Image (cartoon, grey):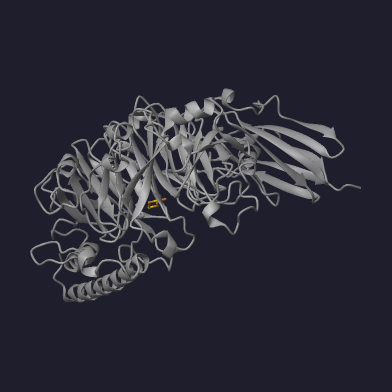
């Protein structure tokens, strides 16, 4: 590190800024927590545990800030456990940098939050490989510009955006099979499917009786269903009835068919469903849930000390549906799963209500399918649900077999292949590593199972380790999806990037972090919530389209033509290749509705062409062997140069056609 006086001076200023930032932010968070917990909450003292040896959380955070500042100035530094790795890893952290020309070992699929897309990264390099538009229209890939994808978006509600949170990879036998990603839209109550052959969204359903889908997952081990939790409680149906009677509002759990994407059935429950995960045997599905008070204001929602996690017995629900024991609402069979439902009487309820500390945030099932972890959010604990006990325990509370005290603001949990869990601590700005079996054996509320904590920067939401949602966790890389980046990057105006941090978890060490090493910061465009990582061998994308996989006519050079359908409708067909369109020009009449069908006839990988028509909002992206159609009105007479948007050859700029629109008289 430089000893230059200017640098020292800068360093001091920077450190001070970080300290100030921390103090400010901590005060805000405390205020928030106090607000949410209300005046009857336990003293701040007891919710802010000391880290032992007289070191307070504030000290640790300060140290983290200082290290961050030094790391930022010097590139890498050897201070503490939380710095960049090159100088202090002792060589036992594999290089996350992937040399030019080489490939990453894993695919990472990130939800884009209210950007509405999915982003694809290589891990461990964290290089962004592509983005898959889902609920958003996107010009680079022509998504929401051609008729096929536009119609899909229109039929699914025609919203201009969505809020993607939870990507779930399809599985066969508990292992990722590389076929699909399913993802929810929190904003509009939808679920979409991305086809991983083409890395393109191929289905979106707007789920009836649901305003907002938050949790979304597939049924393990064989993608039997896709499950979606409605977060917001609404009247059922939400057609103007019961608007002033919040006690009549309901939250529903929906099951979809992964192939047809039809909504098969729904279960109405008490409380407000949140995140969802499946066991590994196709029986139980666990949903975190808050607001069992069924309030509509924050004070009401957090009044009680308990909320009930819901465990859905899926085969039992399917049996009821098959037997016609439901009410049909908006075309969907809805089963009563509320506490008072007759289906929940007796020894085999279809929904088990498991009491946990209030307002838990998530549930993630361990790779071996034994436990479901429910993070406390407002409680510093994680509740461990023993899945086997769900079928047998007389009292649902007995299914909670452990409750380690992990730290402040626990939100999400992920796993390695060695029996460890990792939980994000939003308020503490840390990831905590703990031993699952030890936590089951320890007293509830014990900190004994904690193996180490690492600072992250700052305020993590989801964390995810490689293949941790399948039965094959790899136990090497973990990403903390931090909500705030504060001082970590060059400032870019008031909306900051998030900071996704890569952490190596392959070493178990008896040190402060339990062997976790922070490897890289990675700025991301707002605002991913969750991610899922699969080994590269599990994903087999196509390099060109197969015309069998779409309905549009494949237009060869010979087929390129103009067909007048009637006085005001014209169909234009054009092949596309380097460096020409099958029609050098075509003529239509002013006011014509034009349907243009274009095929990229090339078989060569990576030769993509575009087809853009200025002043007509026409923009097609054509991968090799793909055909797309677009319909528009030629409403102004004139000459319009059609051009190619993808740089495809030395004659790319010359790759043109002319649309001539003749005046109507
Ligand atoms: Cu915790 Cu929507 Cu998964 Cu965000 S949710 S963090
Ligand atoms: Cu085709 Cu540029």
Quadrant of the image containing the N terminus: bottom left
Percent coordinates x, y for residue 412 in the rendering: 31, 49
Image height of 485 relative to 103, above or below: below
Position of 441 with respect to 539 (left or right) is: left
Position of 336 with respect to 278 (left or right) is: right
Position of 59 with respect to 160 (left or right) is: left
Number of marks in picture: 0
Taking depth in this image into account, of 289 and 54 the one nearest to the observer is 289
Check the image and name the residue furthest to the right: 665
- Residue 216: which quarter of the image? top left
Q: Residue at x 10, y 48 (%)?
A: 90
Taking depth in this image into account, of 355 and 503 the one nearest to the observer is 355
Percent coordinates x, y for residue 215 in the rendering: 43, 44
Percent coordinates x, y for residue 52 in the rendering: 10, 62
Residue 73 visible (yes or no):
no
- Residue 489: which quarter of the image? bottom left
Taking depth in this image into account, of 266 and 420 the one nearest to the observer is 266
């Amino acid at each position: 590190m430089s000893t230059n006086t200017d640098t020292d001076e800068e360093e001091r200023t920077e450190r001070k800024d970080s300290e100030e930032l921390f103090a400010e932010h901590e005060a805000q968070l405390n205020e928030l927590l106090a607000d949410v917990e209300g005046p009857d909450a336990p003293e701040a003292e007891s919710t802010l545990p000391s880290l032992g040896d007289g070191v307070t959380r504030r000290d640790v955070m300060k140290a983290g800030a200082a290290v961050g500042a030094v790391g930022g100035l010097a590139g890498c530094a050897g201070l503490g456990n939380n710095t960049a790795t090159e100088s202090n890893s002792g060589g036992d952290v594999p290089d996350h940098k992937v040399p030019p020309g080489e490939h990453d070992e894993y695919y990472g699929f990130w939800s884009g939050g209210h950007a509405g897309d999915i982003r694809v990264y290589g891990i461990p390099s964290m290089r962004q490989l592509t983005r898959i538009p889902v609920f958003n229209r996107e010009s680079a890939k022509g998504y929401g510009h051609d008729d096929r994808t536009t119609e899909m978006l229109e039929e699914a509600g025609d919203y201009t955006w969505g809020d993607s949170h939870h990507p779930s990879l399809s599985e066969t036998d508990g292992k990722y099979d590389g076929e699909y990603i399913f993802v929810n839209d929190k904003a509009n109550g939808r679920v979409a499917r991305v086809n991983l052959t083409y890395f393109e969204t191929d289905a979106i359903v707007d789920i009836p009786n649901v305003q907002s889908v938050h949790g979304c997952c597939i049924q393990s081990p064989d993608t039997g269903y896709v499950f979606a939790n409605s977060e917001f409680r609404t009247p059922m149906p939400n057609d103007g009835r019961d608007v002033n009677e919040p006690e009549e509002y309901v939250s529903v759990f929906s099951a979809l068919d992964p192939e047809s994407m039809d909504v098969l059935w729904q279960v109405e429950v008490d409380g407000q469903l949140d995140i969802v995960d499946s066991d590994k045997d196709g029986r139980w599905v666990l949903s975190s849930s808050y607001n069992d008070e069924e309030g509509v204001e924050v004070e009401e929602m957090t009044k009680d000390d308990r909320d009930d996690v819901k465990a859905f017995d899926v085969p039992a629900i399917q049996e009821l549906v098959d037997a016609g024991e439901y009410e049909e609402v908006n075309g969907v069979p809805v089963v009563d799963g509320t506490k008072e439902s007759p289906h929940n009487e007796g020894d085999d309820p279809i929904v088990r209500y498991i009491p946990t500390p209030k307002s838990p945030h998530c549930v993630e099932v361990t790779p071996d399918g034994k436990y479901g972890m429910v993070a406390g959010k407002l409680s510093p604990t994680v509740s461990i649900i023993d899945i086997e006990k769900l079928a047998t325990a007389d009292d649902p509370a007995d299914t909670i077999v452990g409750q380690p005290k992990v730290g402040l603001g626990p939100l999400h949990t992920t796993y390695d292949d060695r029996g460890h869990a990792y939980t994000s601590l939003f308020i503490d700005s840390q990831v905590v590593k703990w031993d699952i079996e030890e936590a089951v054996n320890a007293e509830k509320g014990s900190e004994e199972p904690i193996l180490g904590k690492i600072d992250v920067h700052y305020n993590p939401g989801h964390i995810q380790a490689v293949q941790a949602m399948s039965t094959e966790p790899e136990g090497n890389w973990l990403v903390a999806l931090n909500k705030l980046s504060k001082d970590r990057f060059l400032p870019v105006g008031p909306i900051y990037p998030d900071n996704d941090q890569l952490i190596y978890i392959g070493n178990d060490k008896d040190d402060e972090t339990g062997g976790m090493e922070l490897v890289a910061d990675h700025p991301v465009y707002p605002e991913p919530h969750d991610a899922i990582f699969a080994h590269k061998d599990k994903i087999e994308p196509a390099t060109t389209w197969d015309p069998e996989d779409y309905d549009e006519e494949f237009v060869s050079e010979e087929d390129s033509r103009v067909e007048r359908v009637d006085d005001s409708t014209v169909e234009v067909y054009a092949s596309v290749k380097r460096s020409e369109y099958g029609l050098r020009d075509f003529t239509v009449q002013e006011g014509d509705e034009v349907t243009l069908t274009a095929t990229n006839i090339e078989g060569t990988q990576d030769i993509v062409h575009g087809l853009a028509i200025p002043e007509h909002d026409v923009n097609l992206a054509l991968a090799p062997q793909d055909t797309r159609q677009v319909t528009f009105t030629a409403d102004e007479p004139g000459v319009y140069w059609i051009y190619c948007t993808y740089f495809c050859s030395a004659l790319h700029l010359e790759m043109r056609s002319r649309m001539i629109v003749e005046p109507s008289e």
